[in-house]
Image (cartoon, rainbow, N blue to C red):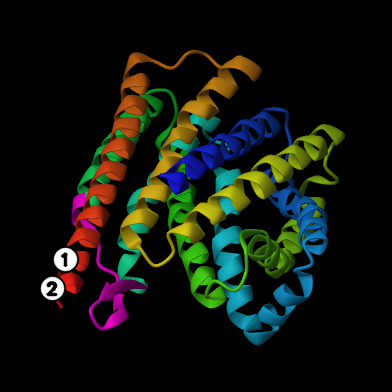
Amino acid sequence: MRPIILGIFAAFFFAVTFILNRSMELSGGSWLWSASLRYIFMIPFLFGIVLMRKNLRQLFDVMRERPAPWLIWSFVGFGLFYGPLCFAAAYSPGWLIAGTWQITIISGSLLAPLFFETIISKNGPQKHRGKIPFKGLAMSMIILLGIVLLQIEQAKVITLSALLLGVIPVILASFAYPLGNRKMMDICRGRLDAYQRVLGMTIASLPFWLLLALYGFFDSGLPESGQVYQSLLVAISSGVIATVIFFKATDMVRGNMQKLAAVEATQSIEVLFALAGELFFLALPMPSLLSWCGMFVIIMGMVLHSYVSHKKSTSARSMTYGHLKKG
């Protein structure tokens, strides 16, 4: 239950991203700066935390072992995740992006065959290639239905091209984030804590963010002070607090695809947090009844997804215990 609670707390702080990204876009700020400044600002905070915990040398030792995978999967997990989300903010309100983002629950389930999970048997721990959790995926389709309801309402007021530009980048990000996160967990093999792993991935993805910032400078000049300040808030809330909490939650269930999918499912609550923030801070018009129905369906899908995943994990543990006892 603790990983689920941590996942919900992470969702709250992640919601700040959607609110402030939309705020910066509405004020004329470039998405290039919104994306790059977050990760540039994250480094000194994370560096200080890891340094105070006296874990910096261990991090660099692990990174030196396999520098290429660190660069590749950090770019996937952070670069191909946050860049597209900031781009999508130019075409959709934050709560809608947060709702569409919940497709990551389905994306995470479809990625299961790319990884191995640890199963306890009478012969001891054994690794088996993950299988797509079809029961959990069925619950995820309920979440997808909610997302469709949100997008149907949005399609009434914007052009098809704008709708696609607000959706396709989010779908790309929904695969990139769990893929990069899980690959880095495999590479680290439990040797690094959440703070170290986030700092390492931020450092490894820094070349991409610097290139993005350079492009932003030539495209729109230097960012205004308001965008810099809001990017700093995003870096602290979403980049440091939320990411560390979420990585901690996923580390706690590492090797169990069912529980991992349940933790990732908690992120569906972001849509409610993002909506509340935009209604309060950005004076966003109240969503229509159809949009509220879509959000309700998303939340119900998340609850059912977590229930099915937890039930299956509990049943698997009971069967394993009984088998071992007989043996």
What is the number of the mark on residue 94?
none
Which quadrant would residue 78 be assigned to in this image?
bottom right
Q: Position of residue 61 (x, y in %)?
A: 72, 81
**Residue pointed to by mark 2:** 326
Q: Position of residue 9 (x, y in %)?
A: 54, 38
Spot the residue most to the left.
Answer: 326
How crowded pointer 1 is (Cα within 10 Å; few <14, some 14-19, many 20+) is rated as few
- Label 2 is placed on what type of residue? Lys
For the point 61% across and 16% down, the residue is 280
Magenta residue span: 116-135
Q: Is residue 73 covered in magenta?
A: no
- Label 1 is placed on what type of residue? Gly
Q: Position of residue 210 (x, y in %)?
A: 77, 62
The answer to which of 310 and 28 lies nearer the viewer is 310
For the point 62% across and 64% down, the residue is 193
Q: Give the vertical position of 7 relative to 59 (above or below).
A: above
Q: Position of residue 211 (x, y in %)?
A: 74, 63
What is the number of the mark on residue 322?
1
Q: Do the residues under discs 2 and 1 have CB atoms within 8 angstroms?
A: yes
In the figure, is residue 47 to the left or right of 144?
Answer: right
